[in-house]
Amino acid sequence: MSTPAEIQFKDVDLDAVAALTGTLAVFVAEDGKLDLCARKVNSLSRKALARLVESEKFEKMKAGDVTALTFPAGLAAQTVLVCKLTRRPTALEARKAGAQLAKARGTEELTVLAGNIAKAEEISLGLALRGYSFDSHKTADKPGAGAVTFMVSKPEEVAKAAAPMAAIAEGVFFTRDLTNEPANILTTDDFAARLAAMQELGLEVEILEEDELEKLGMGSLLCVGQGSASPSKVVVMTWNGGGEEAPFALVGKGVVFDTGGISLKPAAGMEDMTMDMGGAGVVAGVMRTLALRKAKANVVGLVGLVENMPSGNAVRPGDVVTSMKGDTIEVINTDAEGRLVLADVMWYAQDRFQPSGMINLATLTGAILVALGHENAGVFSNSDELSKAFIKSAETEGEGAWRMPMGKAYDDLLKSRVADMKNVGGRVAGSITAAQFLQRFVKDDVPWCHLDIAGVASVKSETALAPAGATGWGVMALNRLIADKYEG
């Protein structure tokens, strides 16, 4: 499992700067003024920092940008990273600055001379998040990154503020690892085992096997995996950190690989379907974060783990299956499988836990990519209050989310001639009809959001806080939602 860099916070010791090895980092305000730490580096390096600040190169740098001074005279360090940063950065600006330091640092030990810089803890979070790499299947020797130390004027205060952020970083890394993992490694059995291992963090973890799912009547979920040799499962993770109140429920789609089934996908790009369990990955990462930071809330996370494969046993277009709720579903397209998984898990979550609210996450539709690209997840909801609270949390954490419409006219597209509903409503409004399908499995008194994360769970190019690949989108936003809305 990938782990974020361990970051230490120490008192500023200017007398020790000259002898520090590896890489140093300093911050310079946009007007070019140097703080105490930067002035010390400037003095030791024979005014090299001042010459940079006076140059056209510094003028062209944007806030948060980093440039390097290599082998500076008068210092034992091989490199000094210079970050241009406003004196009062926002949390997101500070994180992006930290991410730029992570990109530029290499593998040497890093000492960040932060002094009195505002939001040093947010800089450390950005540095930790951008330091991620997924290379567990590469055989070449991988040099480990050196230690990271922040020299700050109030180390105890900054360390206290950074502690819950370390839990967030670990949750994001867990989600990224799961989402990046190839399907021959992350089978349904392996996925469930990784979640069961979180019992050591204080989570209660229960794995429901196929025979139990059959007894519960989860015909909708089970039909998706019946063509695969991998057994379908539902994993329930419970965190009881609050009082006697009902838990908030998170439900994730965990299709470990999606061929499309009998409605086979095109070969080009099918390898990307290792990320089709991204919704379950986010739920797992959030539950890990809550346990690590000992959240004072009751939250239950449920994931449906299946593999969608074509075989002689696979569900066919035209088949009719019966959900746990009792509704019958005509399967028109076996590649619209995620909603079949979520329908049963969502109903089970409500039936067993009577949650105060519920959010499901899924890499559900290509249509949401057409609508929103890779910048925003689609938010569908029956509750203005919950959707607004989530979107606010996402905005605070810099994770894009946009509310999408729902309505009866879209619902009518799911009418079936032979069953209670079809699993698809045609090409138009594909992400909306998928949400309308899911809403049929939400009880009237349960505030609910569906998050379609197909465009944001994994991307081809780097983002502000992540390299190309899995982003971990949603872990920070949902952790923020729980903290702000459900912790006393």
Image (tube, rainbow, N blue to C red):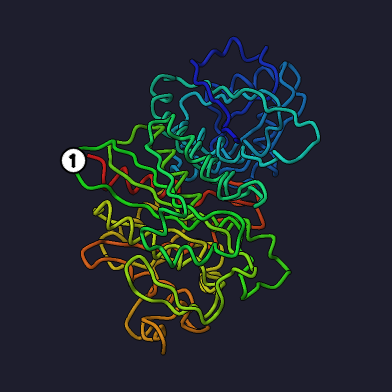
Q: Residues within 10 Å of mark 1 (few under 14, many from 20)?
A: few
List the single residue furthest toward the left: 244
Which image quarter holds the C terminus? Answer: top left
| Position of 99 relative to 420 (above/below) | above
246 to 104, vertically: above or below: below
**In the image shown, does 112 or 264 lie closer to the viewer?**
264
Q: Measuring from the top left, give residue 84's x and y in whole percent.
A: 58, 39
Is residue 388 in view?
yes
Quadrant of residue 143 in the image?
Answer: top right
Residue bearing mark 1:
244
**Vertical placement of 230 versus 262: above or below?**
above
- Residue lying farthest top? 15
* Quarter where residue 416 is shown: bottom left
Q: Work out whether residue 97 or residue 59 is closer to the camera in this orientation and state it.
A: 97
Quadrant position of residue 391: bottom left
Nearer to us in this view, 244 or 13: 244
Q: Position of residue 51 (x, y in %)?
A: 70, 32
